[in-house]
Amino acid sequence: MVSLITRRLALAAAAGALAAPHIAAAQGRYKSEYKLSVVGNRPIPLSEGAFRWAELVTERSGGRINVKVYPGSQLVGGDQTRELVAMRQGVVDFAVFSTINISPQIREMNLFSLPFLLRDSRGFDAIVKGPIGAELFRTLESRDVQPVAWGENGFREISNSKRAIRTPDDLRGMKIRFAAGAIFSEIFSGLGANPVQMSFADLQPALSTGAVDGQENPVNLFLAFRMDTLAQKHLSIWNYVADAGIFLLTKQAYNSFSPQDRDLVRACAEEAAQAQIIGSRKGLDPNGDRSSIDEMQRRGVTVTVLSDAEKQAFARATKPVYDKWTQTVGADLVRRAEAAINAARA
């Protein structure tokens, strides 16, 4: 009888261990809260994607993985260029950020900032959905972080308080804010403008006071933060660079999760990223859904949609910057990117 009872207790203990692996993990290795950093706040797609990812992970894990969003890059004092460093230091566990903000630390990410390389969503998709996107993720993995999904904040367009921008000469003498990266300073200097680097937190007051004349950001952000009320009455759609988004977490956090929870985190990121991409592209098709364009015009913004020929004039003017930064990004990587983009547009 004692032997039978002992056997039953052993079987029950084994069954309990198999039935609740996540509970044991949560009690042992998991944190009570995982901090997710993102620049900006709702309702821009980049931030929406971050909040959605956190909500999905927390809900679908039953609270085992409790992710809290800290918007406005508040964990790094508003300086979005420090998020990658903060992740490696353990200050940030999860993040959704733009490739622009990590390109100063990871030179290959400047691929998305080569002027007029991608041109449209077909070019963007050819990169992130193909071998080059996978290669860039492997580069990130070598920096102690685990990327899990590509997102998108949209192509960066240019607005200003002075005049419509249709030719390179229209930019001459304008003070244009850029977020980060020497390549942007060189692009705007090459176009005759006066580039000014500042964080997003400082941008709105700078526009209000006239400290800068214009800025470059995706249309969804322009609308969400009512830049039309900050003297930005002219916006040109020129698609000069793409703002790619990346969903990632620290290797330490990722490796602490069970295999099932790693799959859950990745699946939630992919779902949130897809919604983010849809949001970033909404209403920007001059020949289809143009609701975002119409909304800007309703607010009194003059919207100038550049033709391919007009974009080529800017591409020629910035060709020296493109050629110089091709060497920084990696000539072979750029060559393969150009081939993938051309094939997608054929």
Image (cartoon, helix red, strand yellow):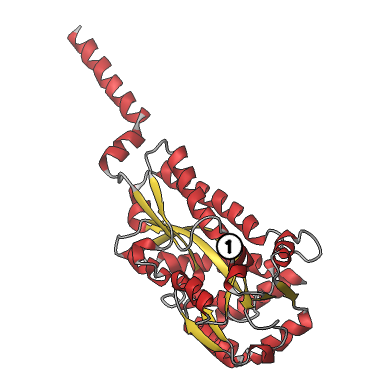
Counting from the top left corner in percent of width and height, residue 192 is at 60, 93
Reply above or below: 216 against 167. Answer: above
72 or 37, which is in the foreground? 72
Q: Residue furthest left?
A: 2
Name the residue at 72% across, 69% down.
344
Q: Residue furthest top?
A: 1
Name the residue at 35% across, 30% down.
20
Amino acid type of the residue tagged 1 in the rendering: Glu
Quadrant of residue 174 in the image?
Answer: bottom right
Quadrant for the C terminus in the image: bottom right
Q: Residues within 10 Å of mark 1 (few under 14, many from 20)?
A: many
Name the residue at 50% across, 78% down.
209
Reply above or below: 18 against 141. Answer: above
Visible residue check, residue 327: no
Reply above or below: 141 against 64. Answer: below
Quadrant of residue 250 in the image?
Answer: bottom left
**In-image side of 328 versus 18 (left or right):** right
86 or 345, which is in the foreground? 86
**In-image side of 15 versus 149 (left or right):** left
Q: Which residue is mark 1?
A: 152
Counting from the top left corner in percent of width and height, residue 135 is at 52, 68
92 or 140, which is in the foreground? 92
Counting from the top left corner in percent of width and height, residue 328 is at 49, 85
Counting from the top left corner in percent of width and height, residue 197 is at 46, 81
334 or 284, which is in the foreground? 284
Visible residue check, residue 295: yes
Name the residue at 35% across, 69% down.
85
Quadrant of residue 338 in the image?
Answer: bottom right
Quadrant for the N terminus in the image: top left
